[in-house]
Amino acid sequence: MLSSGVADGSGERLVWSQKYSVGVDEIDADHKVLIELIGQIDSAAAGSEAHAVIGTVLAALFDYTEYHFEREEKMMQTVGYTVLPQHKQKHDLLKSQVIEYLGRYSDDPNAVNIEDLSKFLQRWLSEHILKEDMGYRPLVENNPKAGEAAASVGIDFFMDVGRGD
């Protein structure tokens, strides 16, 4: 179980539990990383280097989110998830929102309310996993093809993105 995390809107800290599992190890591992990255925003906000750390965490969050979404979308495509286009739209919207936060933060770190950013990301992640991602769970849980598809998006994804391919 993860010891750090984010609040789930009730004031409680969000920690990994089986209720967040979609039944595919790679996707569950990604969700754990995202919980940790968002949790770092709260932790960094209290530190003396908050502005430098927040920018770094936001950039890492964007990069990891791109990787995770690519992996998840490939898995959904492989299992024939019929609402993939709508799910992808939600992914694309979050990516554009994070880019907007990154731009504002880059221009002026004081222009981003860290508490609001943290609450937004916490709420989005919790709701997205529990509502949206659980929609595909019946198709992927214990499905070897889903696991293979998720596992096929690995470190080379970052290498390709870095080259602009």
Image (cartoon, helix red, strand yellow):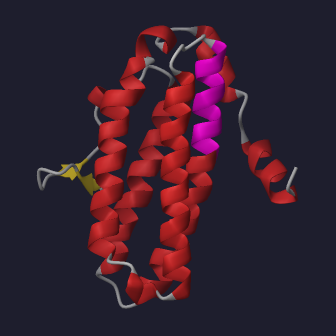
Q: Residue at x 32, y 72 (%)?
A: 43
Residue in the foreground of this view, choosing between 87 and 34: 87
Q: Residue at x 27, y 27 (%)?
A: 19
Magenta-drawn stretch, dominant element (helix, strand or loop):
helix
Q: Position of residue 129 (x, y in %)?
A: 37, 34
Q: Residue at x 73, y 28 (%)?
A: 152
Q: Position of residue 100 (x, y in %)?
A: 52, 67
Against 154, residue 33 (above or below) is below
Q: Position of residue 91 (x, y in %)?
A: 52, 42
**Which stretch appears magenta?**
67-78
Q: Residue at x 27, y 45 (%)?
A: 15
Q: Position of residue 124 (x, y in %)?
A: 34, 47
Q: Based on the picture, tell me whether residue 77 belongs to the magenta stretch.
A: yes
Question: Is residue 43 visible to the viewer in this orientation of the structure?
Answer: yes
Q: Based on the picture, tell me whether residue 41 belongs to the magenta stretch.
A: no
Against 112, residue 165 (above or below) is above
Residue in the foreground of this view, choosing between 93 and 24: 93
Against 59, residue 65 (above or below) is above
Q: Quadrant of residue 128?
A: top left
Residue in the foreground of this view, choosing between 110 and 149: 110
Q: Quadrant of the N terminus?
A: top left
